[in-house]
Amino acid sequence: MTPAPGDEARALVASIGRWDGRPLTFMEVCGTHTMAAARAGLRSLLPPKVRLVSGPGCPVCVTPVGYVDHAIALAARPEITLVTFGDLVRVPGSRRDLEAPAPTLARAKARGADVRVAYSPLEALAIARAEPAREVVFLGVGFETTAPTIAAVVIAAAAEGLANVSVLGAHKTMPEAMALLAASSELTIDGFLCPGHVSIVTGPEVYAPLADRFHKPCVIAGFEPVEILRGVDALVRQAAAGRAFVENAYPGAVRAGGNPRARAVQDEVFEPCDASWRGLGVIPGSGLAMRDRFARFDAARRFDVRLPAPREPRGCRCGDVLRGAIDPTECALFGTSCTPDTPDGACMVSGEGSCAARWQNLEIGP
Ligand code: SF4
């Protein structure tokens, strides 16, 4: 008989609580895990020797400030309609020389820019069809979960012959960032709680180098509190046994080989490239660039935008938060100048950001 979730959760907490070896630090790299763990108060259920920290799992948070500057500059052009997911509109850019306290897409819209919030990139296609005189630019930000959808939009636009839609891309792939963190001496990570949604597309195999090369246990977990606890328990078990392998604790959704169809669509439009991550710098092969044959849909190539070198918001420690090096409360701006109403950095804006979660009295970090 399957145990009730409450019974299983209690049993898992007890199992994890029996760990009495060296302190263990596990990192989750998924914004949905960040919020789910925080909402359920899972950190308070873990013993002092087992720590769950948040890493670079929030796509808006890891998008560098230079990209935000680029988007704001595009929005300022009168011929452009900028279409974006909602979180991005409040992320501060760095051009404080132009605007105080900080420029954002929301402030650009208030000044008259045509910025529209969408729930799906398909809405950009609909706008492009309905308003052929407008140049419609979609902000393509996200991980392996988002890239196939954006690719499908580009393929559809090409098939339709739509000439007035493009994507400003900042897609990233997670395994390369995890490898960077695994190799870092800044924080010793004893294992990864691997992202469930990303893994549905990639399959579990992409984490094998983390286990084989860096000897980091990797467990793919779902998003219910009991599923996250299952993942942490599995990580503790691997660490206790001195083993490191990829374990799929989310088998109902994640299959061997992932979703080859989604990856084929993605590969048709994008190719790997080096990518800049907030807080982690440029990581080789961790981004997705539009292939040359789709160049006309690449907003970065379509519109000539020249900007000064970007600057991170002064005092904001999003980068340290995203590497798991500090808890959000260790940032001097946390709760002083930086709150969800007046965010200084992306991690306080996004619904998946560690700082925003912490502010809501949800607990993340050490
Ligand atoms: S609290 Fe605000 S300023 Fe500090 S790291 Fe988080 S987002 Fe940046």
Image (spheres, rainbow, N blue to C red):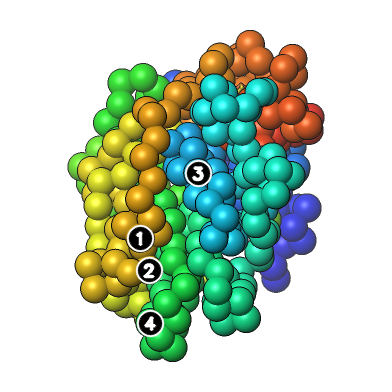
286 to the left or right of 307? left
Dot 2 or dot 3: first in sequence order is 3
**Residue 288 visible in the picture:** no
- Determine contact: label 1, label 4, CB under 8 Å: no
Report the residue at 42% width, 77% height from top.
Answer: 163
Residue type at mark 2: give it.
Phe
Q: Nearer the viewer, mark 3 or mark 4?
A: 3
Query: For this rendering, which residue is in front, 193 or 90?
Result: 90
Residue type at mark 4: give it.
Ala
Tag 3 secondary structure: helix
Asked where in the image residue 34 lies, by quadrant, the reply is top right
Instruction: Tell me how far mark 4 sits from mark 2, CA to CA.
Output: 8 Å
265 to the left or right of 225? left
Dot 1 or dot 2: first in sequence order is 2
The residue carrying mark 4 is: 158
- Determine contact: label 2, label 3, CB under 8 Å: no
Dot 3 or dot 4: first in sequence order is 3
The residue carrying mark 2 is: 297
The residue carrying mark 3 is: 73
The x and y percentages for residue 133 are 55, 74
Report the residue at 61% width, 33% height from top.
Answer: 103
Dot 4 or dot 2: first in sequence order is 4
Query: For this rendering, which residue is in front, 277 or 89?
Result: 89
Tag 2 secondary structure: helix
| Picture layout, residue 132 above or below residue 135 | below
Residue type at mark 1: give it.
Arg
Residue type at mark 3: give it.
Ala
The x and y percentages for residue 230 are 58, 51
Dot 1 or dot 4: first in sequence order is 4
Q: Residues within 10 Å of mark 4 (few under 14, many from 20)?
A: some
